[in-house]
Image (cartoon, rainbow, N blue to C red):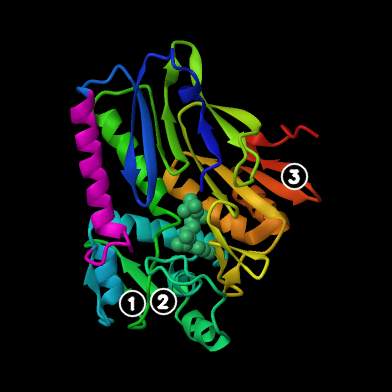
């Protein structure tokens, strides 16, 4: 989730309208220069858009389109909204590219570890329950087709969790909506996933500080100047539980059915699409400190990896950030 401090908020003098609210179990914020609507109207429109997106793809809403797909035992083709189809298609693409390190069908295992909509006592699950949940995982078990958009569950108990990609998609949609209304300079953020366009003020780019990956860190590892881009971060230190002195993160490695356990603490991905940045950040985090950067280079992704090194961290960068290492 987020390790990003919106630097615009440090700069009260900036002449941008700032709005904030709640969505998707987290907070959103946006800064818009020269808003073309009154603030209250702008916020109402954005809240309505976010509600629509939650109604399509939230697993926390039992009546959402995705929850209905999860609940049905029907293995025939089922019609999808274009929005849900778009996100499921991107999820399938990133699943294939990351060899299943990102996999939205890992939901039953996520839920078993206590990170899903049903809150439960956070203890490691029994082995037999884990084996049963893992049998339900595999992104190829959801078939997708378009014209018209549709999906087919190849097993009745397939369960899809879009928590690792839906926030990025929502940020893209809010950014698209703002651009359609004539805005040129803005930054939109939901739970640390960001899209920026234009400038914070004349001649000065939007900037964000990437914090070191500790739960209470406010130390900035580096400041990134953003042009027209999207950026998303996944880390193992924001949502986790502790049991018998051991920490369990909310990113599950589909290959093991267990929370990730390696030295890679956080991944930030820059991409034209926030939806893809979000999914890649999760996939690369799951892949770990060696395979994550290797795949990022192979795919030509721009990413920042923060890796635990004894009591401190080291940074590894790829793509357009490559060579910017401090050490
Ligand atoms: P955040 O939601 O903090 O930004 P992520 O984008 O990494 O973090 O998403 C983590 C969430 O995605 C988990 O809470 C879980 O619901 C789901 N998830 C966990 N592991 C995976 C995985 N390997 N692939 C896809 N989704 C996952
Ligand atoms: Mg993600």
Earlier sequence position, callout 1 versus callout 3: 1
Q: Quadrant of residue 175?
A: top left
The percent position of residue 45, horizontal first and vertical second, equals 20, 36
Do the residues under discs 1 and 3 have CB atoms within 8 angstroms?
no
- In the drawing, does residue 144 fall left or right of residue 108? left
Relative vertical location of residue 114 with respect to residue 297 in this rendering, above or below: below
- In the drawing, does residue 8 fall left or right of residue 35? right
Question: CA separation, marks 2 and 1?
Answer: 6 Å
Q: Name the residue under label 2.
A: 141
Do the residues under discs 2 and 1 have CB atoms within 8 angstroms?
yes
Q: In which quarter of the image is residue 312?
A: top right
Circle 2 SS class: helix
Circle 3 SS class: strand
First to last magenta residue range: 39-63
Residue drawn at x 40%, y 65% is 161
Q: Residue 313 carries which label?
A: 3
Asked whether residue 61 is drawn in magenta, I would say yes
């Amino acid at each position: 989730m987020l390790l990003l401090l919106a630097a615009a908020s440090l700069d009260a003098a900036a002449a941008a309208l700032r709005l904030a609210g709640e969505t998707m179990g987290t907070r959103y914020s946006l800064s818009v220069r020269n808003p073309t609507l009154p603030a209250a109207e702008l916020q109402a429109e954005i809240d309505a858009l976010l509600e629509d997106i939650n109604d399509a793809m939230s697993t926390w809403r039992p009546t959402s389109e995705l929850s209905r797909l999860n609940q049905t035992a029907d293995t025939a083709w089922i019609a999808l909204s274009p929005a849900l189809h778009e996100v499921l298609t991107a999820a399938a693409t990133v699943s294939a590219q990351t060899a299943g390190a990102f996999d939205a069908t890992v939901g039953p295992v996520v839920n078993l570890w206590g990170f899903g909509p049903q809150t439960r006592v956070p203890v490691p699950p029994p082995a037999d329950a884990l084996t049963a949940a893992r049998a339900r995982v595999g992104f190829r078990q959801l078939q997708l087709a378009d014209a018209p958009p549709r999906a087919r569950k190849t097993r009745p108990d397939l369960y899809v969790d879009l928590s690792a990609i839906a926030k990025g998609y929502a940020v893209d949609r809010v950014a698209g909506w703002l651009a359609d209304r004539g805005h040129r300079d803005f930054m939109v953020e939901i739970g640390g996933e960001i899209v920026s366009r234009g400038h914070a003020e004349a001649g000065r780019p939007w900037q964000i500080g990437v914090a070191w990956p500790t739960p209470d860190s406010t130390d900035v590892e580096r400041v990134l100047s953003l042009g027209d881009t999207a950026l998303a971060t996944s880390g193992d230190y924001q949502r986790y539980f502790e049991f018998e002195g051991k920490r369990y993160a909310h990113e599950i490695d589909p290959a093991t059915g267990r929370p990730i356990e390696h030295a890679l603490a956080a991944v930030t991905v820059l991409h034209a699409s926030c939806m893809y940045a979000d999914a890649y950040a999760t996939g690369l985090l799951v892949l770990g400190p060696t395979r994550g950067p290797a795949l990022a280079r192979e795919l030509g992704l721009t990413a920042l990896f923060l890796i635990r090194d004894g009591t401190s961290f080291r940074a590894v960068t790829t793509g357009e950030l490559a060579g910017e290492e401090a050490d």
